[in-house]
Amino acid sequence: MILSFLPELATRIATLRRDLHAHPELAFEETRTASVVAAHLKKLGLEVFEGIAKTGVVGRLKLGDSPCAIGLRADMDALPLPEMNGFPHRSRHEGRMHACGHDGHTAMLLGAAEALSLLRDTNNFDGTVYFIFQPAEEHEGGGRVMVEEGLFERFPMQMVFGLHNWPGLPAGSIAVTEGPVMAGADRFEITINARGAHAAMPHQGTDAILAGAALVEALQSLVSRATDPLDPAVVSVTRFHAGHADNILPEQAQLGGTVRCFDPALQDALEAGMRRVCEGIALTHRVKVDLDFLRGYPPTLNAPEAAGFSLAAATATVGAERVHVNLKPSMGAEDFAYLARAVPGCYVWLGNGPGAGGCMLHSPHYDFNDEIIATGIRYWVKLVETALPA
């Protein structure tokens, strides 16, 4: 039934997607995008709720009298990145571009809302669908803000679902993983305060650079020797700043980096381990070491029942041969994790193909593949049919 109008719908949604690509907006600034979303949902006859987490939008579609409800989520924000493409729909705003495909995610979910509104009288569904258009996924935690502002209290639902396009996976294929799918992402700032001295007379001071070098080396032991080898984890020092002259031992060094893992308990253990290492280095090198451990996005964990619905929907959409089950999770992070912590959720990857010139996400040459729009819409519709059967 959906196949009869899907080609025309997918073509219109591709045009809308390119319009969104040409007008990227950064975290919590998605005012134009939100207005486009709200206008489209209102035209379909959905109940529309705006201004959630500043620029977020939720559309409600009742497909029957059942109290059961699910949420479908798309992210709307762009990245602070100059676009290096030359096609007509390239970004019109210097220094901003949709380099992660959120324009495609938003457009596909609008397409799904339209498809489901057209199918609402077919008696294939029973329940309520909430279409969640979330701001500020890129580093700013818009998902967390939506939850804190009462998303699930205002719009009660039993499960929530998300997807992300995935360059490198064959176009139109779908990857479904139960359990960890995206890592938790914490970051750290370390300041070492020492006693400066002449570089030719190091004994007259304490050495912030030597302490920092020892700290970089010691931090690696947290993964290699202090965690279970079967529990993936990364501790990476990505910045080390100290000194300004060849003949001076500086008084201060600053280090920073990221910590990634899939287990919330391991996040706690790694933070505790880093504090022990900093204390030990401070004593050994007679310096003061201050660690600021900044919690970021938690791990994205797919709940078994929600993953089961997603797997069934993906199989019905693209066929079992094009469904990738239990691929290795990504060390990238995703703030859908906040939604999936509040209610059971599942987050899948939709194959985007090789990408423009083989480029991956967050590349200045990236563009969403419009050929997968129809697959994304079909998946969302089949997921609603699977999770909210008549």
Image (cartoon, rainbow, N blue to C red):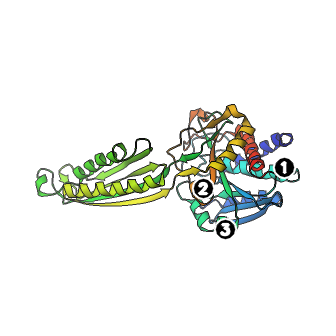
Q: Mark 3 belongs to which amino acid?
A: Glu
Secondary structure state at the residue bearing disc 2: helix
Q: Mark 1 belongs to which amino acid?
A: Asn
Secondary structure state at the residue bearing disc 1: loop
The residue that label 2 is drawn on is: 340
Q: Is residue 365 placed above or below 118 in the rendered structure?
A: above
Label 3–label 1 contact, CB within 8 A: no
Q: Position of residue 37 (x, y in %)?
A: 73, 57
Q: Find the distance from the CA under tag 3 to the CA under tag 2.
A: 15 Å
Identify the residue at horizontal 57%, vertical 54% (top origin).
Answer: 337
Q: Find the distance from the CA under tag 2 to the CA under tag 1.
A: 26 Å
Q: Position of residue 334 (x, y in %)?
A: 55, 51
Quarter holding the N terminus? top right
Q: Residue furthest top?
A: 321
- Density class for disc 3 (Cα within 10 Å; few <14, some 14-19, many ≥20) is few
Q: Nearer the viewer, residue 369 or 277?
A: 277
- The quadrant holding residue 148 is bottom right
Q: Residue furthest right?
A: 121
The residue that label 1 is drawn on is: 124
